[in-house]
Amino acid sequence: MTGTGASSRVGVETGTDTDRLPAPALLPTEGRSHPPVLLLHGFIDNRSVFVLLRRSLRRHGWRHLEALNYSPLTCDIRKAAELLGRHVEDVCARTGHRRIDMVGHSLGGLIARYYVQRLGGDARIRTLVTLGTPHGGTRLASLLPAHPLVRQMRTDSDVIKELAAPAPNCRTHFVCFWSDLDQMMVPAETARIDHDDLRTRNVHVSGVGHLTFPVNGAVAAGIREALAATDPLNPGQSEQTGAPPEAAAPDRASVA
């Protein structure tokens, strides 16, 4: 998949000279509104878990919001990521945005990350926010029923190993919320991303349980800040209410 987050001007080599092509025209709302946001729920939930977050985002200026359901019969993260990619393409076509944002809770964040990192989704996803997602796998998965999706969340699964592999030039910015009270993440730090090739901001949230991430007010405020930040790789997609550039830099942060 070709990249869409490149410079606004493209250089074409012709011998020793470089011709400059004009920048492509903006699509209907690109650059004049927040990018669309897709919300992807966790293993035992459905899209209704995002009702409060959607309300919060809409109240603060986001207009293109969609919460997806994936089938409980889904048995493979890779397949779910492929289906997610088709939906992303549909949203881009309908809204006129080349790149969009995503928020994934728990398993939803892992599906979204697989799409971004392994299926070329970084060309479409500007910012991926994950909430209590087992990026390094969770030891608890070894004690739970042997559903195929649960097995893929084990620390030694093939999917987790794929995500730990090199991912050079990944264009997506990751913001990972994790909590010391998240009993589904064992250890709690597994909900962080520590990967040399990925631009990541890990946000430590105090006193938030696994199932309350999508409905917590402080988390919602942190998500809004992350989604409003200017993309340093594509400043042309900065938002009208953009945060200072340093907000997008990898760091450690906490939400009280």
Image: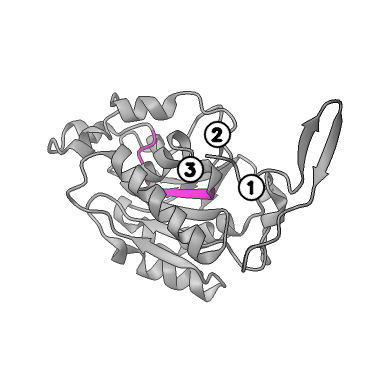
Report the mark closest to the observer, 2 or 3.
3
Q: Earlier in the sequence, mark 3 or mark 1?
A: 3
Vertical arrangement, residue 156 with respect to residue 50, above or below: above
Q: Secondary structure at mark 1?
A: helix
Does the magenta-highlighted stretch encompass residue 129? yes
Q: Are marks 1 and 2 in contact (CB under 8 Å)?
A: no
Residue 245 location (% of width, % of height): 71, 50
Identify the main secondary structure in magenta.
strand
Compared across the picture, whether 38 is left or right of 124 comes to left
User: What amino acid type should be assigned to the residue bearing mark 1?
Assistant: Ala
Q: Mark 3 falls on what kind of element? A: helix
Q: Which mark is residue 248?
A: 1
Name the residue furthest front: 15
The mark total stands at 3
Q: Viewer-proximal residue, 52 or 38?
A: 38
Q: Secondary structure at mark 2?
A: loop
Report the residue at 40% width, 62% height from top.
Answer: 216
According to the picture, the residue beneath numbered tag 3 turns out to be 121
Disc number at residue 198?
A: 2
